Image: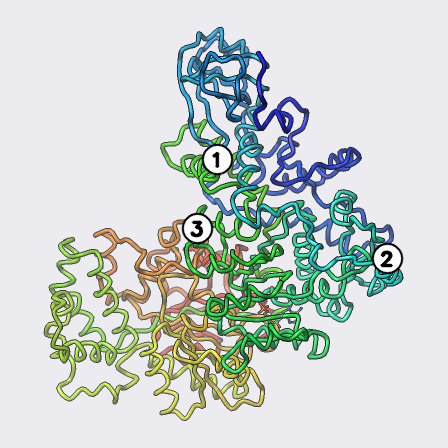
Amino acid sequence: MRRSAAPSQLQGNPFKKPKFISPARSHPSPNEEVAKLNSDIKLFEVAANKNNFLQPQNDPRTCNFNLPTKECAKGINHGDSYREKYCLEASTKTTLDLHHTVHSAPKEITVSKGQEEKPDSLVKYFSVVWCKASKKKHKKWEGDAVLIVKGKSFTLKDLEGKDIGRGTVYKLKELEKIEEGQTMMIGGKEIEVMGIISPDDFNSGRCFQFGGGCSAVLSSSQAAKKCLSNPFKSVCKLSSKENKQNSFQNCKPRHDPYAPNSLVMLRPDKNHQWLFNKNCFPVVDVVIDPHLVYYLRPHQKEGIIFLYECVMGMRVNGRCGAILADEMGLGKTLQCISLIWTLQCQGPYGGRPVVKKTLIVTPGSLVNNWRKEFQKWLGIERIKIFTVDQDHKIEEFTKSPFYSVLIISYEMLLRSLDQIKSVKFDLLICDEGHRLKNSTIKTTTALISLSCEKRIILTGTPVQNDLQEFFTLIDFVNPGILGSLSAYRKIYEEPIIISRQPSASEEERELGEQRAAELTCLTGLFILRRTQEVINQYLPPKIENVVFCRPGALQIALYRKLLNSQAVRFCLQGLLENTSHLICIGALKKLCNHPCLLFGSVKEKESNSTWDESEERNLYEGLINVFPADYNPTMFTEEESGKLQVLSKLLAVIRELRPAEKVVLVSNYTRTLDILQEVCKRHGYAYTRLDGQTPISQRQKIVDGFNSKYSPDFIFLLSSKAGGVGLNLIGGSHLILYDIDWNPATDIQAMSRVWRDGQKHPVHIYRLLTTGTIEEKIYQRQISKQGLSGAVVDLSKTSDHIQFSVEELKNLFTLHESSHCVTHDLLDCECTGENHTGDSLEKLPVSRNCQLGPHQQKCDSLKPLSMSQLKQWKHFPGDHLNLTDPFLERIRENVSFFFQNITNQTTAI
Ligand SMILES: Nc1ncnc2c1ncn2[C@@H]1O[C@H](COP(=O)(O)OP(=O)(O)OP(=O)(O)O)[C@@H](O)[C@H]1O
Ligand SMILES: [Mg+2]
């Protein structure tokens, strides 16, 4: 029978070959590369074994990509040592955070002798080609597929993972004897067996990648089509012999690679040269400017090496994207600036620069921060950057050859997309790029439409908690690398999700784990995440306090009234719409901040003639009578709010004890910020303010003003939603979180604004909570597993996403009036609170279960505190005799309980 070829036959059947190299990751390489490849495999094996998540990857073929090799000129070992460390470390840190994955060694699903007797346990996999059944002599194979034989039944899956045939027609003996070249009929399809697939290749999903991955790569997007194109072609054109000669003369490194402490990039291997150095330029060392190296922290050097190798297509051949997901404050900006400066001046082939123009897209409030960082590290002469704002139109950039870096906000990018498309950018950096996780939003589609192949996403927020969003980010930086979305779903997402369900069978669990491991392995090459701990040693001590403030008398009276309202009662009976409880929660939160906010809302609703939202009316009914008859919200007093009273004392003591230090005061609400602003005015504290209303053009000026040591401002009023992300507020060394958000990420983002590189003073963080109220419940939710679903946090999650059971609502809508601290009551802590009278905060008896001292458990600092970690914090009732912390000492009057934790403690603080 003569047959025309299916795609696999045209390319050679991978499963007949000893080794499978996914075309999604590698190019056809010269024979000599094979030997090198083997040594690379070993290198990665070590890395993989170090990685908890990768532990199931025992098969050496699991990671047989063309990994970077240590081929640098001998004697230049600075970069190498980082690289070597990186190769080991990066992969340990770039794991897909599938926390629920159980890391056990895979059990091979092969047919053992004993098993053969039990028909159901026979499991085999084959690569096949298929066509519709016909009597024609000349068959035209329609595609590749995977045949799964399980006991007597068999399934045929196409390379996107879809079932295309099933049956149980064959006898067990026939199925056992299937061999290469055999033809069979399955569900109206004729198949020919091309080879055997090992259980590992099936379980990891690699057997699908050959066709599904690659064909998908080639069709999924325009950029993907170019995946094998030359990343240098835009800037490395040779026009004449003369040019060539000139270039050759300049072929020496820009900086001395042999100088002490020099940071030298990996030399391209032969495969890379073969593909990208068609003009045979001499290979030149790329050396990071020593001026920058002097300032770089070790993790930043590693980060630059990582970014360089990614965008040069050295980590995954032909793929030039990277995700740098370092935690907040680790200096992602500096790492990118170093990369841009390097690529703009240097390149490995003849020293020719790799990048001419760079596009940086960032949230509006950070545009000028980027400019400042460029100036801080490179001065104003070395590199010409252009920032788009109201006064500087993009046309100025497009018309001028003068500028090499364009910094623009996401909003402005959408407005000027056409002009941007008219410029050929060689490098694209998307700061706070987790916002691109939704592929349907305009910003993402706009950025995808740019032809630039070298793409970097910067994000301090973990990107791995949602497999769908994860795909979008990966597909943005390295289009098509995971195949089409439908193939990705079938091959990775579905098995992984199924494996995590409690009802998953052992087999499903193993399959899901192996697919997850393969996905991690594939993407881990171009995702890098380091945690805050790497810079802790460069930072001053951080003293975190959770302060439980007793509510004022008016607050308690109003709180009781609200809880007795018809609206709350209906909520608890499950009689109201799902969103009604949010209105009740909102009212309680306002009350905790200050009763005058609630008064304002009630009055506002009353005066609104269209007030027909009955739940709100039911909630506020009779409330006004609880306020004094002559209550005037503009004349609010500090005593009316427990937190405000504590805040006022806290500001006074900071002013008195540390007159040179400043305070960042954070709230989620503009109206609350108005009250705090009024407090500043009343006490004569100079302040500045940044919230959602602050024009983008003003924001950096306000930040710079506050950070300047000459600024008279004592307080920075910050709206966490507007300014939480990316800002550096190192001018302040005290940060007070006046209210709490459902999403711990919002609070953590805000807290990270002051404890970062450049901070000179010990940092004091105060989180104010009203004792016994909903604020404590939200805090408990933040630190309990339930609030996080055990997952890393995600900034995009708001309270609207939270579903509450009636039980949970009952708990939320309870006021605990007699407790000093409900959170402590829940900790199951052996101490009674009253027992601490003899201890000071500094001298803690280690014998107590709950008093083990700070920092017992190291954790990903982006993961919020857990209940058990909180238990290890020092904690004391407000009336504890010997607090020793002079700040807490002075605010204790209205405080029922403290928790305190000190990081990086040196001496006195
Ligand atoms: N090596 C360094 N030495 C001194 N200061 C540094 C160094 N690297 C970075 N910084 C400073 O640390 C601060 C934080 O850096 P950067 O804003 O880049 O953090 P980030 O990783 O982008 O954090 P985020 O996720 O919050 O945006 C900046 O003020 C920066 O200038
Ligand atoms: Mg940043």
Tell me where residue 732 appears, x and y as whole percent: 52, 79
State whether residue 502 is above or below residue 602. above
Graded by Cα atoms within 10 Å as few (under 14), some (14 to 19) or many (20 or more), the crowding at tag 3 reads some
Give the labeled residue for mark 2: 241
Q: Whereabouts is ligand 1, in terms of quadrant?
A: bottom right
Give the labeled residue for mark 3: 791
Report how far apart the C-alphas of labels 2 and 3 lie in the structure. Answer: 59 Å
For the question of whether residue 902 can be seen, the reply is yes
For the question of whether residue 750 can be seen, the reply is no
State whether residue 784 is above or below residue 512. below
Tell me where residue 593 appears, x and y as whole percent: 30, 75
Q: Which callout, 1 or 2, points to the residue nearer the camera?
A: 2
Tell me where residue 351 appears, x and y as whole percent: 80, 60
State whether residue 119 is above or below residue 33. above
Q: Which callout, 2 or 3, points to the residue nearer the camera?
A: 2
Give the labeled residue for mark 1: 491
